[in-house]
Amino acid sequence: MRSYQLSNTLFQRAKEIIPGGVNSPVRACRSVGRDPVFIRSAFGPMIKDADGNEYIDYVGSWGPMILGHSHPAVRRAIAEALDHGTSFGAPTELEVELAGMIIDAVPSVQMVRMVNSGTEATMSAIRLARGFTGRNIIIKFDGCYHGHADMLLVSAGSGVATLNIPGSPGVPDAVTRHTISLPYNNADAFIAVMKRSGADVAAVIIEPVAGNMGLVPPEPGFLDILREQTAQYGSLLIFDEVMTGFRVAYGGAQALYSITPDLSCFGKIVGGGLPVGAYGGRKDIMAHVAPQGPVYQAGTLSGNPIAMAAGIATLKEIRQPGFYEKIENTAARLAKGFRHVSEKTGADLTVNRVGSMIGVFFTGQPVNSYDDARKSDLNRFASYYQKMLEKGVYLPPSQFEALFVSGAHTENQIDETIRAAETSLKEIFD
Ligand SMILES: *Cc1c(COP(=O)(O)O)cnc(C)c1O
């Protein structure tokens, strides 16, 4: 048995001085019935806790660490930037460079603004969409998570789904009155609402591959219908690619599915493990952002030089030929392994995968929506999580979060993970 003594001591102390002992809810591991391990360090695909236990990491800081942890090129870039100072509150060359790289990677983005988190990116994109169209209504989809801004905390995924809360106290009805949440992958429901309210819809925001209710891919044609309908009614289509951007392809999910949204949001990978978000899109829309236009949005630390350097270094590595094929192959090996041991042990799991993102659901039914995902057996997921941790595999501590494979994971580590899953599932389904 592994010891978690130092983690437990730290958590007791943390709970007294930080709400729930954590700075973001899912980290508390409540839904999997244990206390969190505190992390000391991470290198490549491995992560080490305060007690010295090592794990193969599939959280990857919830997405950013596509190169694995402590990648030498990223560390070098941060160290070089550090030599010049940490923050100036004035424009720098690094911001122009990263903006240029995003625009080169994602053709729908002609202009981009840096912020400090994914939440800021989506919140700002919504404000811009409303300011640009002069309309109020926002359509989102159940189980999609777009950060914790008030108007988007309706039927949300991620921690909101994990903790099974419908919305949040502190969000006035007046703010969510203009938000409509519809079932993911249900084109008929969407078309019906557009028919009724399309002329008042400022924007439709979606995770083009949903990664905050586990991993749920879009059904063929679903994103095309969103594109057609929004164009028809003059509403903006916002792809929240905070998770999928630079993840499912260098150009994001919009490259994978050949859809051109009006606005896109980024975060996670674009900051290379430092706090960065970005939103961008059509030039005529982005021209409405202050100071070029009247829609206000600002940030003291936006475009921070250390964070820009980490983002640039990360993008330079992952745009190398063959990188995405490699992580896709690694992830495919893992998904295949999960399916195999699920069959072998009679666990009857549903395994979804897009690129290097995987969702393993404790239900035998296909998972195409949040309602489907909620049919999962959460108790069994919780014991699976605990057993995997004990065997040295660090999974996201929620049925409603995706696993991430990085460029640093080796076939040996994948095979070790599959063996751990087989043993764990055997114990659970015996
Ligand atoms: C993580 C995430 C966000 C929020 O980003 P933060 O940096 O946590 O604020 C928004 N949208 C999606 C799709 C995400 O995965």
Image (cartoon, rainbow, N blue to C red):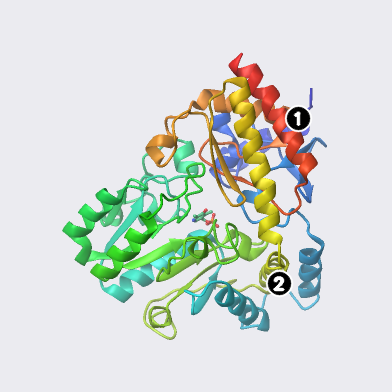
The residue to which callout 2 is attached is 309
Could you say where residue 422 lies in the image, as x and y percent from the top left?
68, 25
**Amino acid at dot 1:** Tyr
Residue at 43% across, 51% down: 218
Per the image, label 2 sits on a secondary structure element best described as helix
Which quadrant does the C terminus fall into? top right
Which of the marked residues, 1 or 2, is nearer the chain's N terminus? Answer: 1
Of residues 209 and 177, the one drawn nearer to the viewer in this rendering: 209
Looking at the picture, how far across and down is residue 270, in whole percent? 61, 65
Ligand 1 under 8 Å from disc 1 Cβ: no
In this view, the mark in front (1 or 2): 2
Q: Look at the picture and state if 388 lies above or below 277.
A: above
- Residue 290 in picture, x, y percent from top left: 43, 81
Q: Residue furthest bottom?
A: 292
Q: Given the current orientation, which residue lies at the most extreme top position?
A: 430
Q: Amino acid at mark 2?
A: Ala
Q: Residues within 10 Å of mark 1 (few under 14, many from 20)?
A: some
Q: Position of residue 259 (x, y in %)?
A: 43, 65
Which mark identifies residue 4? 1
Q: Give the distance between the C-alpha atoms of the residues marked 1 and 2, in whole angstroms.
A: 35 Å
* Cβ atoms at labels 1 and 2 below 8 Å apart: no
